[in-house]
Image (spheres, helix red, strand yellow):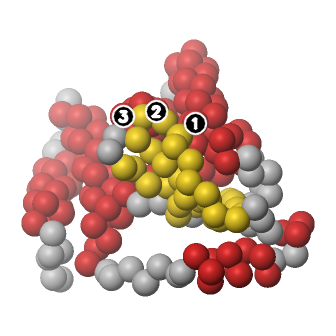
Amino acid sequence: VRPPSDPGQAALLTELRRLVERERLAPPDAAERDGLRREIERLRTNVQERAWQHGGGAVPPPAPSARVLMDAVSAAPAADRPTIADYVDLGGEMHVVLADGSGLRLLRLARSDELRELAQRVRVDLGVVSQPVLPSAVRRTVLGSLRRGLARLDELLVAPIGCSGPLHVVAGGAWVTLPWSMLPSRIGRPTTV
């Protein structure tokens, strides 16, 4: 097994392996087991996000020219014509470069820090509601928080682009792991990342 070329990723994986082994060796009733499981899950998420951010050493393909991109969008039948949304964080602001039936355009969406906070809250809420044993009152509260977070992300990231048909999201870093198809306006609509 070759270690990753990114030293930060290598350090995270080393710590993750250490904690997994510690959890494996802990007695079944050990009080520290729950804390270890939470820390292991946090590290796994960090490893995945860092791999997406740094590309795992892979070289991305060259970006298509604006003409090639618009030719591809225009070639699709009108009913199936996609909107391509490339989300870019620039100077603390989230922007989106859109390619759709109207052409190419750039929109400023929202402050990046607000979006990151919302996205993190949604990820945590999803992790909590995925637990098989959760008191119903806690589940209701967390589901409410999840719905509000998804609605707000939808309002800030998708509503401004006005896409009611197929959406292809181009995003980097932690934005790749955002549950785009769970945003209220995207439920039941083709959404690829």
Question: Residue placed at 79% from the left, 81% from the top?
Answer: 75
Comes first in the chain, label 3 or label 1: 3
Q: Using the numbered discs, state the Cα–Cα distance from disc 2 to disc 1 in whole angstroms.
A: 10 Å
Q: Are marks 3 and 1 in contact (CB under 8 Å)?
A: no
Q: For the residue marked with disc 2, what is the amino acid?
A: Leu
Q: Residue 175: image x %, image y %? A: 45, 52
Q: Nearer the viewer, mark 2 or mark 1?
A: 1
Q: Is residue 183 left or right of residue 116?
A: right
* Residue at the disc numbered 2: 118
Against 40, residue 150 (above or below) is: above
Q: Using the numbered discs, state the Cα–Cα distance from disc 3 to disc 2 in whole angstroms.
A: 9 Å
Against 186, residue 121 (above or below) is: above
* Residue at the disc numbered 1: 156
Q: Residue 100: image x %, image y %? A: 72, 64
**Element type at marker 1?**
helix
Q: Which quadrant holds residue 84? A: bottom right
* Residue at the disc numbered 3: 113
Q: Is residue 104 left or right of residue 173?
A: right
Q: Which quadrant holds residue 71? A: bottom right
Q: Residue 58: image x %, image y %? A: 32, 81
Q: Are marks 2 and 1 in contact (CB under 8 Å)?
A: yes
Is residue 27 or residue 55 the one in the foreground?
Answer: 55
Question: Residue placed at 18% from the left, 34% from the top?
Answer: 32
Q: For the residue marked with disc 3, what is the amino acid?
A: Asp
